[in-house]
Image (tube, grey):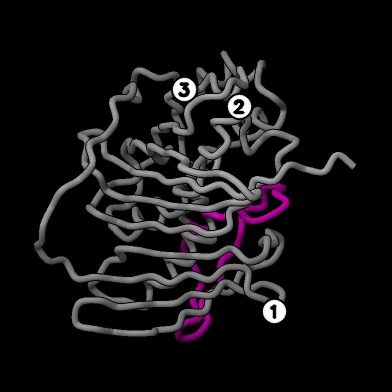
Amino acid sequence: MSAVADLLAILDLEPLEVNLFRGRSPQAEWQRVFGGQVVGQALVAATRTVDGRRPHSLHGYFMRPGDPTVPIIYEVDRIRDGRSFLTRRVVAIQHGAAIFSMSTSFHSDEPGFEHQMDMPDVPRPHELPSEKMLKEQLMPTMPQAIRAYFERERPIELRHCDPLRYVDGKPRPPMQSVWIRTTAPLPDDPAIHQCVLAYASDMTLLDAAMVAHGASVFSVEIQAASLDHSLWFHRPFRADQWLLYTQDSPFAGGARGLARGRIYTEDGTLVASVAQEGLIRRRRTD
């Protein structure tokens, strides 16, 4: 519960002036700010300048590593207010320079054509080991970087459909599926659930580009970082109930990897889609 309370506090930005907000980072001895935190906070800033409409898409670029020791200033530009769509641009600033920029579009609910891709056939969350069981059974065999990641108290619980991939180092087809949810209930406000999912959507996604190489973003020989991030919201959902985050990587090359994700509720409803390109560079041995 404390981790979720901390997440909600981090997403509760401080208003400084019209269109200007301040966010903070958790003091967790991280060397840089988690990308999902910046995406989530930027979406909070944009949402607080809009009444009565929900975001349907966001597209952001990471430009500099965030410094977790100082606040982040979010400046919102109200680019357009139309009858059906509104557009906001958000710039995150630290030390006088932009570290992240994002465009977000808001849309009024209206009927239209409907279809969706089916959810893949994967184990259900109750069929997979919990994080507690994973820590007890697999963590002693995990590399130190992966073990340290799972040892932290986090607001998002992850249940990998193939947890052994972080242990055996075997190449697999470039795809993976992970069940996600918050570790405690969230308020009923739909905007909070969207911002929490924006935060969580940066978790594990870039790692899909490493599956085919038997490696992960935790590997000591890999330098990894998100370069851009796009998220589309399709239907209402609750981020405190299990969501399947199924991911694939259609391409990697030139020290970059492309990863895509689809997010489903347990009943198979597609609620969001994600795409991200990231840096996956081999570290120099010297």
Q: Which residue is mark 2?
A: 214
Q: Position of residue 284 (x, y in %)?
A: 82, 43
Residue at 65% from the left image edge and 48% from the top image edge: 255
Q: Which residue is mark 3?
A: 162
> Which amino acid, mark 3?
Asp
Label 1 element class:
loop
Q: Which residues are magenta?
A: 9-36
Instruction: Confirm or deny contact between disc 2 and disc 3 (CB under 8 A).
Output: no
Q: Which residue is mark 1?
A: 96
**Which one is earlier in the sequence, the residue at label 2 or at label 3?**
3
User: Residue 105 colored magenta?
Assistant: no
> Which amino acid, mark 2?
Gly
Which one is nearer the viewer's eye here, 5 or 88? 88
Q: CA distance from mark 1 to mark 2?
A: 40 Å
Q: Is residue 262 left or right of residue 1?
A: left
**Which one is earlier in the sequence, the residue at label 1 or at label 3?**
1
